[in-house]
Amino acid sequence: MRPVIVVHGGAGVIVKEYEEGYRAGVSLAALKGFEVMKHGGSALKSVEEAVIVLEDDPLFNAGHGSVLNEEGDIEMDAIIMDGKTLRSGAVSAVRCIANPITLARLVMEKTDHMLLTCKGASLFAKAQGIQEVPTEKLITERSRERWKKNLLPGSNPLACQLGLGTVGAVAIDAEGNLACATSTGGITNKMVGRVGDTACIGSGGYADNAVGAVSTTGHGESIMKVTLATLILHRIEQGMSPEEASDTALDYMKTRVNSFGGVIVVNHKGEWAAKFSTKQMSWAVVQDDQLQCGIEQGKGETLSDNKPL
């Protein structure tokens, strides 16, 4: 099997001045993840490392750079899933953690559970030796200003969310094993304790060696209503390509609950897709030592020799 990794940096509307940063970020993440598999690493490790790159990049709404809740604090969600075993680990409403995706993997590998939240996740992180990071080190000035703006009467936090999507990765390795990983800071000025689709298996992500792997981005509550990740995999089971399955599922979400989003998919044959019903979504893929990336609908750029933008 030829290893493939696909990465997304969130669906929505991306401010022009940040476009190159988004392209560079997802490209670097995809290259990092592919490098893992190129040296014999697993798809699971590949997607984790790719998402860590995006969590560490303050431009993206995950880890450092996460949006703030109504109290001006950060609460983050993440999920990771192994398509070989169907084991999954997730965390929700976690604070003071630089890389929630790594904590999610520890939940999968070190506990009998699939999801830990808030205080319990924090206690588990400490027990696993994960160092706490002061919240102020995770908050960017951009996130702080957006939060303040949305406190004003008549503000529209949902409109301010545009371009601030979840990050994620899907991959298939040389052994044919699939994995997905998704991480987010959620919705700006959200209620304390709000958990969206990201940490919910089947909505924010799903991976099954027999079918494929999916990571989603968009309005979390809408994604949960249609369980978008598993909806796409059901379509693939029915014989659709990743591209057809993605388009069909996104069209259904638009028609059924009047909402938009984006997905990245790779099936058990190594065929992939990066599709979105929003105006834009930053994405990148590496296959056969070749990098492709894009932001606009129907427009992708191919770069050879594994060189990021």
Image (tube, rainbow, N blue to C red):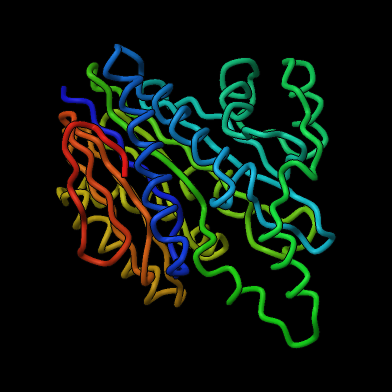
Q: Is residue 201 above or below residue 300?
A: above
Is 124 on the left-hand or right-hand side of 170? right
Instruction: Decide which of 164, 20 is in the foreground and name it.
Output: 20
Q: Residue at x 30, y 22 (%)?
A: 177
Q: Along the horizontal axis of the image, is 54 left or right of 125?
A: left
Residue 63: x percent and y percent? 63, 42
Which quarter of the picture shows residue 5?
top left
Q: Residue at x 67, y 45 (%)?
A: 76
Q: Locate residue 64 relative to residue 292 in the image: left or right.
A: right
* Position above or below: 172 against 241: above
The quarter of the image holding the N terminus is: top left
Q: Residue furthest top?
A: 40
Q: Position of residue 50 (x, y in %)?
A: 43, 33
Left or right? Give the position of 294 relative to 87. left
Judge whether 195 appears above or below 174 on screen.
below
Identify whether 164 is placed above or below 136.
Answer: below
In front of the other: 253 or 299: 299
Residue that protrudes farthest toward the bottom in the picture: 154
